[in-house]
Image (cartoon, grey):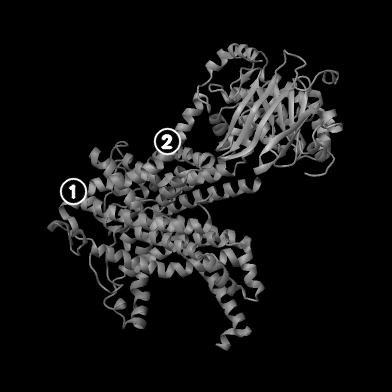
Amino acid sequence: MSQESAEVISATAGASARAARTRISPAGDRIFMFLLYASAWFVLAIVAALFLVLLQRSWPAIQTIGLGVFTQLWDPGGGHFGVLTFIYGTIVTSAIALLIAGPVGIGAALFLAELAPKRLATPVAMLIELLAAVPSVVYGIWGLFVLVPVIRMYIGPALQHTFGFLPLFQGPIYGVGMLAGGLILSIMVVPTVAAISRDVFEAVPNDQREGMLALGSTKWEMMTKAVLPYARSGVVGALVLGLGRALGEAMAVVMVIGNKPQIVASLFQPAYTMASVPANEFSEATGKVYISALIEVGLLLFIVSLLVNISARLLVWNASGRGRR
Amino acid sequence: MQAIQETQPGRPADASATRLEVKDLNAYYGKHLAVKGVNMQFEPGAITALIGPSGCGKSTLLRCLNRMHEVIPHAHVEGEVLLDGQNLYEPGVDPTDTRRRIGMVFQRPNPFPTMTIMDNVLAGVRLAGKPPGDATLEEISEKSLRRAALWDEVKDKLHKAGTSLSGGQQQRLCIARALAVDPEVLLMDEPASALDPISTVKIEELMRELRGAYTIIIVTHNMQQAARCSDYTGFMLAGEAATGELVEFDTTSKMFTTPKEKRTEDYITGRFG
Amino acid sequence: MDFLKSPGFRKFWNAFMIIIAALCAIVCGVVLAVVVTFVISKGYKALNLDFFTKLPLPVGMTGGGVANAIVGSLEIVLMASVISVPVGVLAGIYLALFGRGHLAANVRFFSDVLTGMPSIAIGVFAYSLVVIPTGHFSAHSAAVALAVIMLPIVVRTTEEAVRLVPGVIREGALALGIPAWKATLLVTVPVARAGIVTGALLAVARVAGESAPLLFTAFGSQYWSKGLSSPTAALPLVIFQYAISPYPDWQQLAWGCALVLVALVFALNLTARLAFSGRVSAN
């Protein structure tokens, strides 16, 4: 037997010599697998490159300014590059956005996932996706020419009339300002919160709902006591993801916030955000340190967004089982 | 049938035909040993059935024969599978060469959805880089479809989608597709289990017609099918830790009348499984 | 407390809150309608043949168009697609077919994270990576920025699409002795084609409207671009630069651009989603 097979092997030696040496593979397959792995690594390399390139280019500013970056005064001409006012503006506008978009987005998601018949839910979900698809600069022009006058003439005076005792709503109403920025952001954040919350709600197993309904609960009680608690971490993730979108948005905000580096209580006052500073000043920036400082603002924004997104994704992945696939 | 009665199992009737042989074969999924210690010789030109309860490793064993097992991530094989004495698992053997020589038909018909009937039949010839020889592509597709007993039903719609056919026709299309690359061995993994009874009969008739021209190995959980169609039968059973073993392997007539092993008899008479 | 637990109040509260939830969904639709209505009503007046065929005119002269911005946008988005789609599709195939280990988990995770990165930060990245070393603004650098934004979208939608293709299709191809690369690219991928195209269209729709990363890469221009390595006009930039200008003529052009952009982005989105959902239900 062994002699026989030895003969056969030598007879086919030509054929096997032609074939590739390793187990898995003709040459084409090895090249293909290499390309697949290279592409996968490329995605990771991009994330790393984002960080490293931004760090490298902001290094001159980091060396010159040091911790001075965490001060209030932003005066490029005088060599002062403090970003605290931008951080304040970002926090306030993002907070307004989330206060409005959070409840509305979650409500819309509950409606789509739990209440609406599929025939209605599909087109409505499509509309919400279109809301997300509107380019931010279009929200910007709409905000500038429609929302800002509406705030100056109606919303602002009404708020001042009702809540004027709060420092938030005192002072002159310009129209442009943190309120306008926050409102525009809330429109842009709603689709994010709604779409992801909906996914998370739909991942809640049906026995959770049935168990609660079987106890004699109403539909709303079923949603608040069974669905929401089960989906809690995912909903938090959706909100954090919405926050990520809000604090990173540059164009819509830069067009309506007034772009003034100051920390004031009144929401009617102009301000500035992390994302809108580079958008507004980059094309006019001169001098190595100034440009480098703007890149450093980008770096800070990148790091904050990275942290926000990582935590959001971890929450959402665990809730919808996305990462385990 | 004569040749079979005259020869012992595992002893080739015709030394010139392609012989397929398994030696000390273990198959793993990751660390799990799914099939252990299989030794078999398949009669050239005959139909061999592998039977056993589900989870006994018969499909896994079948997939080891043309190196389809390793397509599953983390799955690997130990031991030897010899095709005409050449170990298919030797380093340097190209699995695509192996699969061209050992064709396979799957449990569910899997025509390529984006291809026409004709493109499906010719997929292997075109994409596997096998030289078509003297025959034109049209000739190859007609010959394969005729051999798969499908030609008359599809000759007027060769450019329609393969998925437009009925389930039974799709399965015969997949057989034609496998035959088009001119394999020496044909592996069939429960080829009729997803089909209706009439289509099943057609597949079984087809197998009988292909017998002699190809060495056919079929996995089935249907004992009657094995008894009806095959010349040899191997019985597999999962033992400890869900590891499948070949319990007994003999001519089909002996397996179903005078099995040597108690476990074979129990299974065949329906006492478990 | 008893009142709050009474069946009557619970029923009322249930109905009330359901209406509130429905209102939340309706509000989204209304906001969309309001924005779109304004864009159409203000933008359509700017649209005429000149808008699509002429260059912008200096302040004070009426008329003119944004032909250079339309061409510039097409150039930049096309280049970005050429960079990101092949790599993204390959990475998506990797995730769908071989993606089980740590590498795959990380690629999935950071793709999703990258999707959430501020486009302005990616613009600063492209500026730092391309504009500073080459010393000038260019369509190239803008394409790099947009490609980075497109990449994760293409990766994840390709993965989803390829994953939907039954494994037996690929196995059928492998069992014929077809090499894995051909089985994947010529058998599996064509089945997933609709999904992959959808992903690419959604990615294009997303970046076609991006302006923040173009501000300091493409930079914008009043003239025809002198080539891919010179400053180039783009529709989103025109909207921004003209909207904040004090001249009504320019603001008018900005609204016109907004209308064109919204129409383009919506068309891409709807095509992509309708084409893909039809495909899924057909299987």
The three-letter code of the residue at mark 1 reads Pro
**Looking at the rendering, which quadrant does residue A40 occupy?**
top left
1 vs 2, front mark: 2
**Dot 2: within a 10 Å radius of its alpha carbon, few (fewer than 14), some, or many (20 or more) residues?**
some
* Nearest to the observer: residue C111 or residue B77: B77
Q: Position of residue C81 (x, y in %)?
A: 43, 40
Residue C234 place in picture, x, y as percent: 35, 46
B158 over A214 or under it: above or below: above
- Residue A298 vertical placement versus B109 (above, below): below
Pick the residue in front: B206 or C248.
B206
- Dividing the picture into quadrants, the one containing residue C165 is top right
Extreme residue in the bottom direction: C2
* In the foreground, A235 or C34: A235
Residue corresponding to mark 1? A60
Q: Residue B163 location in percent, x, y?
A: 69, 37
Query: Distance from label 1 to label 2 (Cα)?
Result: 33 Å
Question: Residue A109: where, in percent of width, then height?
Answer: 53, 64
Which residue occupies 47% across, 65% down?
A: C31
Q: Is residue B112 visible?
A: no
- The residue at 53%/68% (across/down) is A228
User: Disc 2 marks which amino acid?
Assistant: Ala
Nearer the N terminus, badge 1 or badge 2?
2
Say whether residue B180 is left or right of residue A262: right
Q: Quadrant of residue A117?
A: bottom right
Chain for disc number 2: A
> Callout 1: few (<14), some (14-19), or many (20+) C-alpha neighbours within 10 Å?
some
In the image, residue B27 above or below residue A94: above
* Secondary structure of the residue carrying numbered label 2: helix
What residue is shown with label 2?
A: A38
**Disc 1, SS:** helix
